[in-house]
Image (spheres, rainbow, N blue to C red):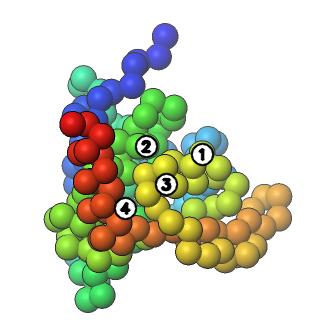
Amino acid sequence: MSEPTPPAGRVRLRPTMLSDLDYVISVEQDAENRPFITPWERIQHEGAVRFPDFRHFIIEAGAQYASAGFVILQGCRNPHRSVELKRLVLQPKGRGLGRACVRLLTQMAFRDLGAHRFWLDVKALNTRALALYRSEGFVEEGRLRESVKTDEGYDSLIVMSMLESEYLALLDAREAGAA
């Protein structure tokens, strides 16, 4: 029996430590995740952990806050206030963790990092992630056609973003809906 979906309060992000990188690499290499990402070498993750323009986090979830994936933000010191959701990888899937993480990351980007624009790219074949990002208010900006080589040929990247004004309007709408 699978653990029920943890409430948003039961998902947290903690800074990745170098000692976490074996876990990070294992999650990237998992057969369920590989079609949707371009895995990094360990040295790239080490750089993201150390370099101040990045934020590299372990996702912890559930009653015991077990490791449930990782996330990387890039552009955290971008002078144009444009922060990128570089990577979000979950293990396991289908428990509502993605939505909880996207909400935490969006809040972090706009509230904590002072972003004007929060953006990402996602492989076109990743229909589950596309649906999640759209439902959370991200807007498609364009497509980089057949820009990523896959085992089956090529896939396109879809660039999506949310602006600070859109985020604030979304928060107002959620608040009004809860009232």
Label drawn at residue 116: none
Q: Position of residue 56 (x, y in %)?
A: 31, 60
**Residue occupying image coordinates x 70% and y 55%:** 125
**Residue occupying image coordinates x 61% and y 41%:** 32
Q: Quadrant of the C terminus?
A: top left
Q: For mark 4, what is the residue?
A: 72
Label drawn at residue 128: 1
N-terminal of the two: label 1 or label 3? 1
Q: CA distance from mark 1 to mark 4?
A: 19 Å
Is residue 53 shown to the viewer in this render? Answer: no
Nearer mark to the viewer, of 4 and 3: 3
Q: Report helix, strand or loop for mark 2.
A: helix
Q: Is residue 32 left or right of residue 172?
A: right
Q: For mark 2, what is the residue?
A: 98
Q: Position of residue 112 (x, y in %)?
A: 16, 65
**Residue occupying image coordinates x 58% and y 54%:** 130
Tag 3: amino acid: Tyr
N-terminal of the two: label 1 or label 2? 2
Q: Nearer the viewer, residue 127 or 42?
A: 127
Q: For mark 3, what is the residue?
A: 133
Q: CA distance from mark 4 to mark 3?
A: 16 Å
